[in-house]
Amino acid sequence: MAAALHALTAGAMDTMIMAMMTRATLGHAGRDLHAKALTTQSYVLLTLAVATRVCGDSEIAYLIAGGLYIAAFGIFSAVYGPILVGKWHPIRAPSKISQTAHPKSQWSVQTSAAI
């Protein structure tokens, strides 16, 4: 039961959390939505951490899994920390927002021209 719980929480949820943080950081900073090699490495380390924790049943396996988990989020922090706290330097132009109005409504709706 504990292994299944860790597979769900550390595996599925933490991977999704890291994915959302990656996407939000790149998107809001005006960067291209393309993962670099270190980003991919952090995802691989997180997956290895989960696999080690779920499959390992000894104290050393738990320590290795914890080290891999720390390394995964450490790499993520080293790559995306400067983007989050630094000045905003967009690499790509922000998408243009066009305004269109529904014919039967007085409210205008904003739609993205290019995402």
Image (cartoon, grey):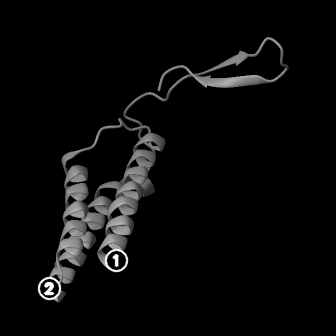
Rendered residue at 47%/27% (across/down): 115
Task: Indicate whether 52 appears above or below 98.
Answer: below
Q: Secondary structure at mark 1?
A: loop
Instruction: For label 1, count other residues whose C-alpha is less than 10 Å away and answer few (under 14), some (14-19) or many (20+).
Output: few
Q: Earlier in the sequence, mark 2 or mark 1?
A: 1
For residue 25, side relative to residue 62 (left or right): right
- Residue 80 sits in quarter: bottom left
Task: Indicate whether 5 appears above or below 91.
Answer: below
User: Could you say which disc has been placed on residue 1 in the image?
Assistant: 1
Q: Amino acid at mark 1?
A: Met
Judged by depth in the image, the label closer to the viewer, 2 or 1, is: 1
Residue at the bottom extreme of this rendering: 59
Report x, y in % for residue 11.
Answer: 32, 63
Q: Amino acid at mark 2?
A: Ile
Give 52 or 3, whichever is nearer the viewer. 3
Residue where numbered disc 2 is placed: 60
For residue 28, side relative to residue 16 (left or right): right
